[in-house]
Image (tube, helix red, strand yellow):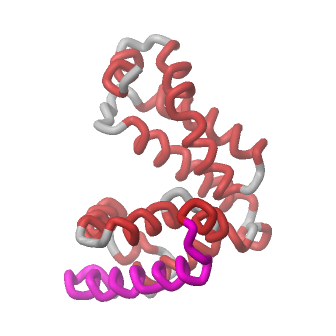
Amino acid sequence: MNDSKIIDLFLARREQAIQEAQREYGKLCLRVAENMLGSPQDAEECVSDAMLAAWNQIPPDQPAHLSAYLCKITKNLALKRLEYDGAQKRDSRRSLSLDELADVVSGRDDVGEALEAKELGDAITRFLRGQPERDRLLFIRRYWYFDDLSVLAKQTGLPEKKISGILFRVRRRLKAWLKKEGYAL
């Protein structure tokens, strides 16, 4: 079933919408949550909460890309779960990708103080569109899906050190681009 049909089910308030969204995008959302939380049980709970949140938000929301919409909800719920569980208890491998970006996006701890989250997201999207496909895909897999370097290495056939270097250079280019565009502080 395609996105528009699933969204129509949500808009019609048919419970089948949750089942179809789960069938179509549940595994993707589960991967995002597991990569962030490191616990299959917590990830499953997060995905269930994300499906409920989608039910409560559609309508009035009418997302253009249901997969991105559901992943965003899942990611936000997982971040809240990490915050709730306490920063000192976080798995450093999972928080590392967030820490890598923190230096690029803002010199402050709270990115929201630097600029509106949507504006920042739009700026990063514009930057990524101008990057080579390999670099763009590695960046998205690492910082959106929170894939570990070892997973990226297996999937691309590149050594972890090379991937790390590529990501370092992309972050450096992003930081320079954001400064030039007036986003970075």
**Image-quadrant location for residue 57:** top left
Q: Is residue 41 above or below residue 83?
A: above
Question: For residue 1: magenta?
Answer: no
Image side of residue 120 versus residue 18, left or right: left
**Image-quadrant location for residue 2:** top left
Residue found 26% across the figure and 83% down from its top? 177
Image side of residue 97 versus residue 58, left or right: right
Instruction: Please provide the residue range marked out in magenta.
Output: 157-184
Percent coordinates x, y for residue 28 in the rendering: 55, 42
In the picture, the quarter occupied by the N terminus is: top left
Q: Is residue 66 above or below residue 13?
A: below
Residue farthest along the front direction in this orientation: 157
Q: Is residue 58 visible?
A: yes
**Image-quadrant location for residue 10:** top left
Image side of residue 122 versus residue 69, left or right: left
Residue found 63% across the figure and 49% down from its top? 33
Image side of residue 14 versus residue 152, left or right: left
Q: Nearer the viewer, residue 66 or 27?
A: 27
Percent coordinates x, y for residue 158 in the rendering: 56, 73
In the picture, the quarter occupied by the C terminus is: bottom left
Q: Is residue 106 visible?
A: no
Residue farthest along the left direction in this orientation: 181
Counting the numbered discs, the total is 0
Q: Is residue 95 above or below residue 165?
A: above
Q: Nearer the viewer, residue 176 or 88?
A: 176
Percent coordinates x, y for residue 27 in the rendering: 60, 37
Residue found 37% across the figure and 12% down from its top? 12
Q: Nearer the viewer, residue 108 or 65?
A: 65
Question: For residue 180: magenta?
Answer: yes
